[in-house]
Image (cartoon, grey):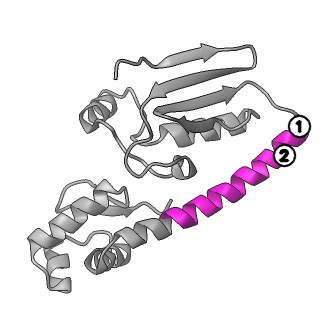
Amino acid sequence: MGTDIQIKMFDDRFVVESPGTLPGLIRISNIRNMHFSRNPIIAKYLRDYKFVRELGEGVDRMYREMFEAGLPAPEYKVEGFMTVLTVRKFKQLEETEKSDNDQKKRLENDQKTTRKRLENLLDKTQKQILSEIELDNTITIKQLSNKLIFGTTKIKSDIAKMKELGIIKRIGSDKGGHWEVNND
């Protein structure tokens, strides 16, 4: 409360200090593959008016573009009630190779750990819904209700929770669209 975002620029790096901890289920270990909007209304506005390419792509895109430019990966840490991002200008060559290998291993472990944690958050019905969506990504809520023998209200509630966790999202309309499972 009452603390501003601070951007500190140095010769070899810049540091962004933002008040508040990471939102929702976001952790430093899954920040690249887990997405959460603190304010979905602002996020929708930014997407609709094309201020962002795609919702939830910013952090991963920053990592990719810095990697492609030969720069070190961004460094995140949470200190008290501040989230701190450090972006470095350069690093030594052997440090780059070691860091890139470590980063790949960390990313693989993060993805496995995140998937397990998310699966632990889902109840039996939600896992069945996810399984059905993976088999047929055009399946409707009514079809899910019929297949799983649950009311549409329960199915809608479970789907809402899975959307909130970033596990699935609906692309297109309810009738003509399809489901997308976030395999990250």
SS category of the residue bearing label 2: helix
As drawn, 29 above or below 129: above
Corner quadrant of residue 87: top right
Mark 1 residue type = Leu
Numbered-mark total: 2
Q: In which quarter of the image is residue 88?
A: top right
Question: Disc 2 and disc 1: Cα gap in Å?
Answer: 7 Å
The residue located at (48%, 66%) in the rendering is 115
Kind of residue sitting beneath label 2:
Glu
Image-quadrant location for residue 164 = bottom left
Q: Quadrant of the N terminus?
A: top left
Position of 11 with respect to 170 (left or right) is right
For disc 2, the marked residue is 97
Residue stretch in magenta:
93-114
Which residue is the site of mark 1? 93
Kindly tell me whether residue 33 is visible in this rendering: yes
Q: Where is residue 140 in the image (x, y as percent from the top left)?
A: 19, 70
Instruction: Reply yes or no: does residue 6 show up in magenta.
Output: no
From the viewer's perspective, tell me whether residue 39 is left or right of residue 119: left
